[in-house]
Amino acid sequence: MKELKTILNENSFIKKLNEDLKNGGVIAFVTDTVWGIGCLPNCPKAVDKIYDIKGRDRSKPLILMSNESENLFPYVEKISEAGMSLINKYFPGALTLVTEKSDKTPKYITSNKNTVGIRVPDNLFFQKLCSVIEGNVLATTSANLSNYPSSKTYDEALNSIGCYVDYVFEDYGCICQGLESTVVLIENKNLKILRQGAIIL
């Protein structure tokens, strides 16, 4: 990974960040698409907080994001050949792949569905963030109140949800492109586009 000098280079901050996340913390951060908020996937208190912050419908699942595909594989069942082809082509990038979840993925993240969305953003700051978080995976959604536009800058994220989350990270020049990810459901060899976004399939 290319070196990026940020607050994440400070060991004392990394320690506090991980402690806050374990205690139910929610953070906001830039990705390659739009700004996001996230928490540890094994923390139901924090997941509840995300839904409450956004006023998000509980029938809408969160997605799992990481800096490396390998960190996400334990959260899903065996991915089909078609799914791996998409991962190899578009990860890291603006594609969210929805596939069958494993027992490691709590149903409170997936809205009791048997599938979960996974993604590896192509954003240097987000990748560094995940690399210092214990477990290297965040349960995420966009950084905005429900029914309002997604945040595309640090100031928009700060103004939208800054007073509700534990920390809003600067982007350190790693800006987003402002268009949501494409979401694809994969069932065996069949692909279904659930949301057309930055990647055209």
Image (spheres, helix red, strand yellow):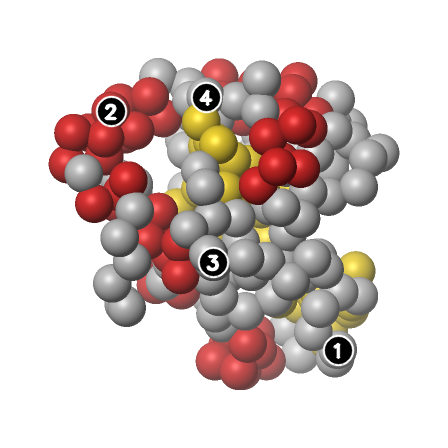
Q: CA distance from mark 4 to mark 2?
A: 11 Å
For mark 3, what is the residue?
174
Q: Which mark is residue 16?
A: 2
What residue type is disc 4 on?
Answer: Asp
Nearest to N terminus: mark 3 or mark 1:
3
Q: Nearer the viewer, residue 45 or 6?
A: 6
- Residue 132: x percent and y percent? 26, 45
Residue at coordinates 40% horizontally, 61% vertically from top-left? 124
Q: CA distance from mark 3 to mark 1?
A: 23 Å
Nearest to N terminus: mark 3 or mark 2:
2
Residue at coordinates 58% horizontally, 24% vertically from top-left? 162
Location of residue 201 by image quarter: bottom right
For mark 4, what is the residue?
166
Bin the neighbour count of mark 2 within 10 Å (Cα to Cα): few under 14, some 14-19, many 20 and up: few
Q: Is residue 65 left or right of residue 195?
A: left
What residue type is disc 3 on?
Answer: Cys
Q: Nearer the viewer, residue 134 or 98?
A: 134
- The nearer-to-camera label among 3 and 2 is 3
Whether tag 4 and tag 2 are in contact, CB under 8 A, the answer is no
Q: Which mark is residue 200?
A: 1
Whether tag 1 and tag 2 are in contact, CB under 8 A, the answer is no
Nearest to N terminus: mark 4 or mark 3:
4
- Where disc 1 sits, the SS reads loop
Whether tag 3 and tag 2 are in contact, CB under 8 A, the answer is no
Q: Is residue 185 visible?
A: no
What residue type is disc 2 on?
Answer: Lys
Q: CA distance from mark 4 to mark 3?
A: 21 Å
What residue type is disc 1 on?
Answer: Ile
- Residue 88: x percent and y percent? 47, 80
Residue lying at the far right of the rendered structure: 147
Q: CA distance from mark 4 to mark 1?
A: 35 Å
